[in-house]
Amino acid sequence: MTAWEARLERLPAVTLAELESEYALLTRVDRKYIVSPAVWADLMAEVEGLRALEIDGVRSFGYESVYYDTPELDSYRDAARRRPARYKVRTREYLDTGGRAIEVKLRSPKGETVKHREWLADDAPAEPLEGSAREFVASFPQVGAAVDDLAPVLTTRYHRSTLVAHGARVTVDTGVTGISAEGPRIDFGGALIVETKSSMRAGDVDRALWARGIRPTRVSKYCTTLAALQPDLPSNRWSRTLRRHLTTAAHAA
C-alpha cells in the first residue's frame, strides 16, 4: 500500500447517498492534474475536511468506459480544435459495485461541463448503441444525426477513489489504460490523474496543488490516449501531456 492509499484509508467516510445528494455537481468546472503518488500523499495530509467515498468497506473501485465516435472521429476532432460546443458519448460500467450507464457530456461556450446520465438495464446490449441507450443519446440536439454513426472507438480502464472537501468533489484515478477497438493499448504508468469538480471557484485541493507549482493539465482519457495510439491525429492541444506522461509506444493488448 502506498502512502497516499494509507491516508485514504484513514479519512472519514462519506456514503454514496451523501455524495449523490450533496456533491452530484452534474454542472461544474473540471480541472485535471497529473500528480505523482508521493506529492498527492503530502497534499492529503494538508487539506482539511477531506472525506472518502466508502461502499461496503471499499474505497477504490474499478471502472470501464467505452467511448463512441463517428468514423471520422468528429467528437475527438471537435475537442482537438477546441470548438466551444461539443459532445462526448460513453458507457460507463462500475466493475465492483455493479451497474452500467450511458452518459452524454456537453461542453458549454462558458467552459462548463454538463453531464447527462441514464442507467441501463442489466440485459442491455453492450454495443452498439441500441434501444434505450440510442434513444437517450438521440434526444440531445448537439449529437444530432451522428447518433446512427456512433461506434465504439476506445475503452478505458482504471481504479478510482472519490473524495469530497468543502463543496468540491475530487476523483483520483490510478492505473489509467486506454485500449483501442483494434487492440493496442497505452497507459499513464504510475501517475495519478486527479480531477476536481466544483462550481466556478477553485477549491482547497486546487489551491494546494497550485502552491506546489502543479497547474491544471490538458488531459482527456479518451482524447489523450487515442492521440497516443493514433499519432496521425491532430493533437497539439495535448502535446505536453503526450510527451511527458504517456509511455512512448503502444503495445499489443
Image (cartoon, grey):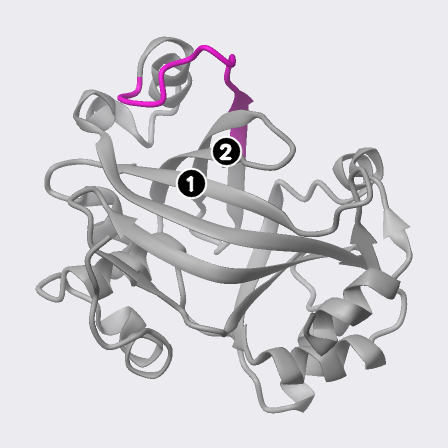
Q: Residue 108: where, in percent of width, then height?
A: 45, 47
**214 displayed left or right of 126:** right
Q: Residue 150: where, in percent of width, then height?
A: 22, 29
Secondary structure under tag 1 reads: strand
Relative to 126, residue 238 above or below: below
**26 displayed left or right of 4:** left
Which residue bears the numbered disc 1?
Answer: 65
Q: Decide: marks 2, 1 in contact (CB < 8 A)?
A: yes
**Which residue type carries mark 1?**
Ser
Identity of the residue drawn at 73% across and 77% down: 3
Secondary structure under tag 2 reads: strand
Q: Quadrant of residue 173?
A: bottom right
Give the CA separation, mark 2 to mark 1.
6 Å
**123 displayed left or right of 148:** right
In reply to whether residue 128 is colored magenta, the answer given is: yes
Identity of the residue drawn at 26% across and 44% down: 75
Which residue bears the numbered disc 2?
Answer: 93
**Which residue type carries mark 2?**
Glu
Identity of the residue drawn at 52% across and 26% down: 100
Q: Which of marks 2 and 1 is nearer the N terminus?
A: 1
In reply to whether residue 148 is colored magenta, the answer given is: no
Please report the bounds of the magenta region as a residue range: 116-129
